[in-house]
Image: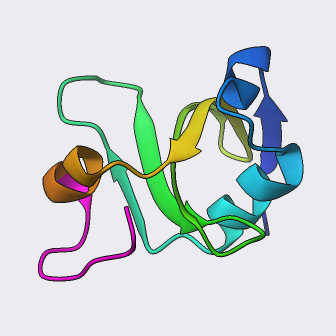
Amino acid sequence: MEPKIICVPSAFKHGFSEADIRRAIKTSIREFLIDEYEDKYAIIGFDTRENALEIIFNLIDDQTIKVYHAMRCSKSFQKKYGPKGEYYGC
């Protein structure tokens, strides 16, 4: 079952649409808890144009996530959190 996705306004700050965010979540290649936080998660996935995105979200409950950040995956983000030895155009 796919999660219910709530996008707050800050998720669109970098110009990505809700469709881009949903596709990146659906096509995630890496999902993880960000080390420095108890409730901040991230995904590396691909938008509707196959660009690698970094998506940051909180869990609301078992079936709901709140996305508050979506942008083209940066090299520093992939270096720190991405699959080792693989490059996704970040």
Q: Is residue 31 left or right of residue 26?
A: left
Is 83 drawn above or below residue 77 in the view shown?
below
Residue 66: image location, x then y, percent: 69, 30
The front one of 50 and 42 is: 50
Residue 85: image location, x then y, percent: 12, 82
The front one of 33 and 77 is: 77
Q: Which residues are magenta?
A: 81-90
Is 58 drawn above or below residue 80 in the view shown?
above
Q: Is residue 67 left or right of residue 64?
A: left
Q: Residue shown at 18%/25% (left/top)?
A: 36
Residue at the top extreme, as displayed: 9
Residue 10: image location, x then y, percent: 69, 18
Residue 3 seen in this snapshot: no
Identify the image quadrant of the C terminus.
bottom left
Q: Is residue 63 left or right of residue 86?
A: right
Q: Residue shown at 43%/52% (left/top)?
A: 73
Q: Is residue 1 left or right of residue 81?
A: right
Picture quadrant of residue 79: bottom left
Q: Residue shown at 81%/33% (left/top)?
A: 6
- What is the image's colouring? rainbow
The front one of 5 and 17 is: 17
Residue 89: image location, x then y, percent: 39, 71
Q: Residue shown at 20%/46% (left/top)?
A: 76
Residue 54 seen in this snapshot: yes
Identify the image quadrant of the N terminus.
bottom right
Look at the image and say whether residue 3 sits in the magenta stretch. Answer: no
Is 54 drawn above or below residue 58 in the view shown?
below
The secondary structure that dominates the magenta segment is: loop
